[in-house]
Amino acid sequence: MRILFLISAIVFSSFSFSNDKIVIDKKACKYVQERISLIEKFHSLEEGYSFELLSASKFLAEITSFKSKSQYSYKSIGDAKENDINAWKIWFEGNKHLLYWDDQLKTVRVR
């Protein structure tokens, strides 16, 4: 009987009965949304270049593992593929609960 009780206790202790809520880091989410918005803004341009665009694209590719099909050079800003933007948006909506702001690195990281 004692062994049965111990086994039951171990099994039930492995389950979480708490009402865990998903914590969303608002600072991290805002940072990612700003990067997506920046790329959307440049998507409508026909030609140009910005270090911010290159930086935003590199950042999003890094955290999502989705590499952009555009090279973001002087002539390719209008080529910011809508598929890239949509992929990053979809990834963000599905994974924003995994994002957190790293104060030491001063950037967003993925858990």
Image (spheres, helix red, strand yellow):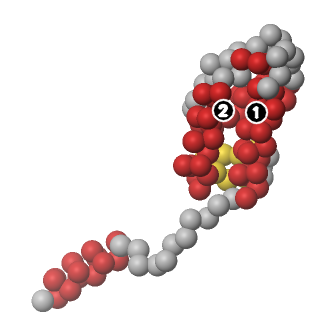
Callout 1, which amino acid? Glu
The answer to whether 22 is drawn above or below residue 29 in the figure is below
Q: Residue at x 76, y 51 (%)?
A: 30
**Residues at badges 2 and 1 in contact (C-beta under 8 Å)?**
yes
The answer to whether 82 is drawn above or below residue 29 in the figure is above
The secondary element bearing badge 1 is classed as: helix
Give the labeled residue for mark 1. Answer: 40
In the drawing, does residue 3 fall left or right of residue 60?
Answer: left
The quarter of the picture where residue 36 lies is: top right
The quarter of the picture where residue 85 lies is: top right
**Percent x, y of residue 84:** 63, 28
The quarter of the picture where residue 78 lies is: top right
The residue nearer to you, when weighing 45 against 67, is: 45
**Percent x, y of residue 65:** 57, 32
Of the 4 image quadrants, the one containing the N terminus is bottom left
What is the CA distance from the residue labelled 2 to the residue labelled 1?
7 Å
Q: Residue furthest bottom?
A: 1
Q: Earlier in the sequence, mark 2 or mark 1?
A: 1
In the drawing, does residue 94 fall left or right of residue 77?
Answer: left
- Mark yes or no: residue 6 visible: yes
Q: Residue at x 61, y 35 (%)?
A: 86
Q: Residue at x 46, y 78 (%)?
A: 18
**Percent x, y of residue 77:** 78, 19
- Mark yes or no: residue 53 visible: no
Give the labeled residue for mark 2. Answer: 85
